[in-house]
Image (cartoon, grey):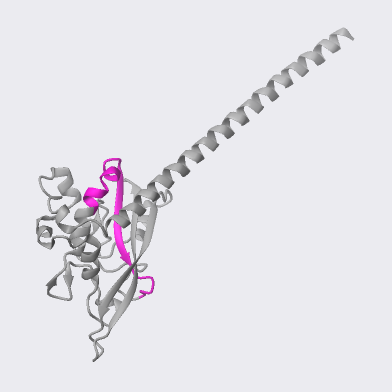
Amino acid sequence: MVKKRGQAALYDGIMFLLLTGLSTSVVFVFISSYGNAQEQALRNAHFLNYLESVMKAMYYVDASNIAHASDSMPPQEQALYPNLNCRNLGNWGMVSVAELLKKDLADPGSSTSDVKLDGKFGNDALAPGKNAMRCAMKEIMKPFSYSGYKYLVEVVDPACTGPSCTAGAIYTAGEKITNSQIPNNGGALFSCDDVLSHLGESKKLMAVSTPFRILWVDNADANKPTKIRNYLLRICVWPTTE
């Protein structure tokens, strides 16, 4: 009887230790997971808050203030920002980056297919909105660039379904507003959706959009009325995979 009681006590002690260890592990795993989730949520909140501030800054940054953004770039930056020349922005004085970008997108025409982000108003008049945005983003996004993140800025027309759009992204001629070297899949269209496809299963991409209203003249109408295009200005950020 004494032997059986001893065995029962030993068994109870072992089970108590197992249950205690298991409970402790569960508690620590839960606390660790909760802490990581909270840290990730706070980091995302800080990122999104910064990106929203970047969007607002475009209305307050004058073109002349970023005229020296391309001066003395080291070779590694030249590779990320090919053919970047901000010096000509000094001629635009106190015109904001957002105003130049809107002028670039106010191409007269009857459809979205007539609109291009190409640094021109129509076919001839100079409106370096894309270049101003490239120069401004190079400076403003340095905290992300130096921390191993890539970014892409695009203008989106939610109503666009024609061949000039990829998921609504307006055609961007030449270099894109990005610090990424991800190839354009053989075409000139390059959107945040392309980046999402490139990232695959990881999908660690954050994006912020803001309304971007454009006034334009419809030359197809004999009265040449002023109309409105309701676009979105979108910026997406992702950890570098390059």
Q: Is residue 10 left or right of residue 1?
A: left
Where residue 144 sits, quadrant-wise, is top left
Query: Can residue 144 be found in the magenta stretch?
Result: yes
Where residue 188 sits, quadrant-wise, is bottom left
**Where residue 187 appears, x then y in whole percent?**
25, 65
**Where residue 160 appears, x then y in whole percent?**
35, 74
Q: Is residue 175 visible?
A: no
Identify the residue at the far top of this view.
Answer: 2
**Where residue 40 appears, x then y in whole percent?**
46, 41
Q: Is residue 47 visible?
A: yes
**Where residue 137 appears, x then y in whole percent?**
24, 53
Q: Nearer the viewer, residue 154 or 200?
A: 154
> Is 194 situated above or below 148?
below
Q: Is residue 23 left or right of residue 80?
A: right
Residue extent of the magenta highlight: 137-161
Identify the residue at the far right of this view.
Answer: 1
Q: Which residue is rendered at x = 24% and y = 90% of the image?
A: 223
> Is 240 situated above or below 167?
above
> Is 9 situated above or below 31?
above
Query: Can residue 166 be found in the magenta stretch?
Result: no
Q: Which residue is rendered at x = 65% and y = 23% of the image?
A: 21
Where residue 147 sits, quadrant-wise, is top left
Tally the numbered discs.
0
Q: Nearer the viewer, residue 126 or 159?
A: 126
Q: Which residue is rendered at x = 22% and y = 56% of the image?
A: 61
> Is 114 situated above or below 78?
below
- Where, quadrant-wise, is the N terminus in this rendering? top right
Q: Is residue 34 left or right of residue 77?
A: right
